[in-house]
């Protein structure tokens, strides 16, 4: 009996049991017996997160290049910075899909159908900022839901999404500040 067990209730698996289990299921990679979720469902959900992030990379990259107008350079730099961060998120999510036994889907043919956010080019600088703010708010709402879904069943995926969510909230905040700076009023005030 280990320090973690009592006759009434084995609390934590002892090291030997954990090692035996890990050895018996090497083909499952990072997914062990203690994984509380459904790995296939988790992969399916993360494919949509990956697509969402990839669409964000494309939208911000396009905006960072085509944005024009007075004081557009600082906005372009911000779009470019966001594009880099969205790319980083896509990589993290793709790696998690691989850990869960899936194959990350980068197929451009079906990208927008799998994504929660849309690709919108935007006709001018203010329009671009608005499109990005909308996309960020969609991502924030979507990821908050997913964090609740993963809960304690898959803390690794939940933690990954929490990390990404914090950045998306910053992005939304920055887009909102830009909108106020360029339009003089907050978008959501009507
Ligand atoms: Fe992102
Ligand atoms: Fe973002």
Image: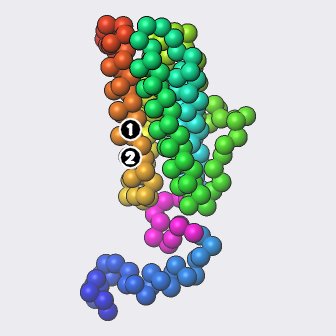
Give residue 99's position: percent from left, percent from top. Answer: 56, 61
**Residue at the (43%, 51%) spot, across then down:** 160
Quadrant where the C terminus lies? Answer: top left
Query: Alpha-carbon neighbours of circle 2 within 10 Å: few (<14), some, or many (≥20)?
Result: few
Whether residue 116 can be seen here = no
Write the start and end of the magenta stretch as one range. Answer: 29-39
- Against 31, residue 181 (above or below) is above
Q: Is residue 160 magenta?
A: no
Confirm or deny contact between disc 2 and disc 1 (CB under 8 A): yes
Vertical placement of residue 104 versus 170, above or below: below
> Is the distance from the Cβ of mark 1 to the nearest ligand 1 atom less than 8 Å?
yes
Residue 59 x %, y %? 56, 26
Q: Quadrant of residue 65?
A: top right
Q: How many marks?
A: 2
User: Disc 2 to disc 1, how far (Cα)?
Assistant: 7 Å
Q: Which mark is residue 167?
A: 1
Q: Which residue is mark 2?
A: 163
Pick the residue in front: 6 or 57.
57
């Amino acid at each position: 009996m280990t320090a973690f067990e009592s006759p009434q209730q084995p609390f934590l698996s002892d090291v030997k049991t954990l090692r035996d289990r890990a050895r018996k299921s090497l083909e499952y990679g990072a997914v062990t017996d203690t994984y509380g979720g459904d790995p296939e469902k988790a992969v399916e959900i993360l494919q949509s997160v990956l697509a969402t992030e990839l669409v964000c990379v494309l939208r911000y990259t396009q905006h960072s290049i085509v944005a024009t107008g007075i004081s557009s350079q600082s906005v372009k730099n911000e779009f470019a910075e966001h594009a880099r961060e969205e790319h980083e998120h896509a990589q993290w999510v793709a790696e998690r899909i691989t850990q869960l036994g899936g194959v990350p889907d980068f197929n451009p043919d079906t990208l927008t159908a799998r994504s929660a956010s849309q690709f919108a080019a935007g006709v001018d600088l203010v329009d671009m900022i608005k499109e990005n703010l909308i996309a960020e708010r969609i991502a924030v709402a979507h990821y908050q839901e997913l964090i609740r879904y993963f809960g304690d069943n898959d803390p690794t995926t939940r933690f990954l999404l929490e990390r990404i969510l914090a950045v998306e909230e910053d992005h939304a905040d920055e887009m909102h500040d830009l909108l106020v700076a360029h339009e003089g009023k907050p978008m959501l005030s009507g």
